Amino acid sequence: MRRTAAVLCGAAIAMAGLPAGAPAAASAAPPALTSAVTTGTTGTTAPGTTGTGSPSASSPPAAAKLGWKKCATGDTPTLQCASLKVPLDHARPNGRKITLALSRVPHTARAFQGPLLVNPGGPGGSGRSLAGFVASSLPKAVAAQYDVIGFDPRGVGASTPALDCAPGHFAPVRPDTVPRTPALEQANLSRARSFARACGAKYKDLLPYLDTVSAARDMDAMRRALGAKKINYFGYSYGTYLGAVYAKLYPQRVRRLVLDSIVDPRGVWYEDNLQQDHAFEERHRAFLAWIAEHDAAYGLGTDLAAVEAEWHTMREALAAHPAGGTVGAAELEDTFIPGGYYDGYWPYLAEAFAAWVHDKDADALVGAYRTFGAVDAAGDNGYSVYTAVQCRDAGWPKDWNRWREDSWAVYSKSPFMAWNNAWYNAPCAFWPTPAKRPVDVANDKLPPALLFQATDDAATPYEGGVRTHHLLRGSALVVEEGGGNHGITLSGNACLDGHLATYLRTGKVPHGPGEADARCAALPAPKPRPAGEAAKAAPKPSPGSALHGLLGFRS
């Protein structure tokens, strides 16, 4: 559930980007079309509801109209943008307002199925660019039936106010993450405490309202502003938890619900992060084993043990002498963690690894860091919202001795990301805002939901998908067998995408007798790049690289 808001540089990601400037002049709304659902899309008001959530939530005010304006990109010429004011505190609907940034790819078909809200995860992920990607990646006949709606959740990106607690918090070179000495532990603790203090000092009035329930209530404000009686929702990673929470609060407002790479709702958030460490260890070892299989390309050894030994030797050397004065042990981990999210990055990471081992090529390693790891250094807003939401959503241990004991226990079995992840989340031990209780997302009031989960997903391990399948009665689970990527639909797997398209077109879900209702084979592992390709080049555009750039590296 880790999140950085920045994405891959290069053409693979530019295809879905939004322009930096202000939107162009207002565009006309789509022509009135015969609708499959009784909703409008031009900002007409519709009856509201507070759902079945917090009894303290007051009746919402009348829905505001959305003033859609052109904000087209080269890849999404019909893209529109709008903003929506919502209460900071939904229990006080007439109090202070904040602003949410929205995007839309309008429907064009006569059979209109309503708005499809999309979310890339996080918390802290900007979702405006995802609308164009989803609209262009779905079959045209399916996408044409929906208004695909992207949005920056409260505190994120173009929404205002946007958080930035401590600019430069991840600037290199950071202390080694593994606290083998008291000095290292204190250095990392100081960073965590200072970040929590900075958030409390700058955003004392906002932090109590940065949580998943508030974001879900924002989504219902969007529904009302869109003039829709019900919404369709498609979320990745943390977006699956946000969708499940919305469905719990407003089950009668859910038409279709797609969850891809699913958070385990019973571990929110401390336990989920510990389980994530073990899963990332297995995924990292799979990457090292892949390097061993391709020894002819990389020359790092023909078995896992040999390659793993080279990895640890490299890490220790960089802890003592950072490559190019930039890539120390912490930055090395940041660089290779994205390989646990998406195996399309493996050839680029392996090239940088081999260049360092064979030639002590600092430029190659620094280049890989800037492409993959430096998103932390550039993602101050995403990380600020990530911590604010996760620290507020659920209780975290306040005794650092508990963190120390648990992290060393995890490290003894799964060293790759254990301490890096602990320090990433450590501000929650010192967070200035009291934690809420997590939402029980168990739900028997929904139409059939469609769930997607890879068996070897590291960021949201497989058990979370199975558990959510049991909690959402009537849901269907589609499993990618042997898949390890995080975010698996719209990434080139035709079997998975076929189930998604059928559901969005008809509402039908598969049914099977076992734990999964349908199973799809994973895509093949990547191949090493030809020797003539530049090792420092960014990944080529592909459905997988485009999606994973939008999801970020720590969704």
Image (spheres, grey):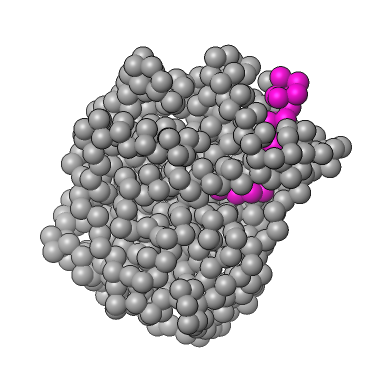
Going by the image, does 343 lie left or right of 219? right
Q: How would you classify the magenta stretch by its main secondary structure?
A: helix
**Quarter occupied by residue 373:** top right
The image shows residue 56, relative to residue 318, as above or below, that is below
**Residue at (18%, 41%) from the top-left corner?**
434
For the record, the magenta segment spans 341-361
Between 130 and 293, the one lying in front of the other is 293
Q: Residue at x 62, y 18 (%)?
A: 323
Q: Please give left or right for residue 553 compared with residue 92 in the image.
A: right
State the image coordinates of residue 168 (x, y, percent, origin top left): 44, 25
Q: Is residue 419 inside the magenta stretch?
A: no
Front-lying residue, 298 or 109: 298
Vertical arrangement, residue 537 with respect to residue 11, above or below: above
Q: Compared with residue 54, is residue 129 higher up or lower down, i.e. above or below?
A: above
Residue at image position (43%, 25%) is: 178
- Say whether residue 343 is magenta: yes
Q: Residue at x 34, y 16 (%)?
A: 182
Q: Is residue 476 left or right of residue 408?
A: right
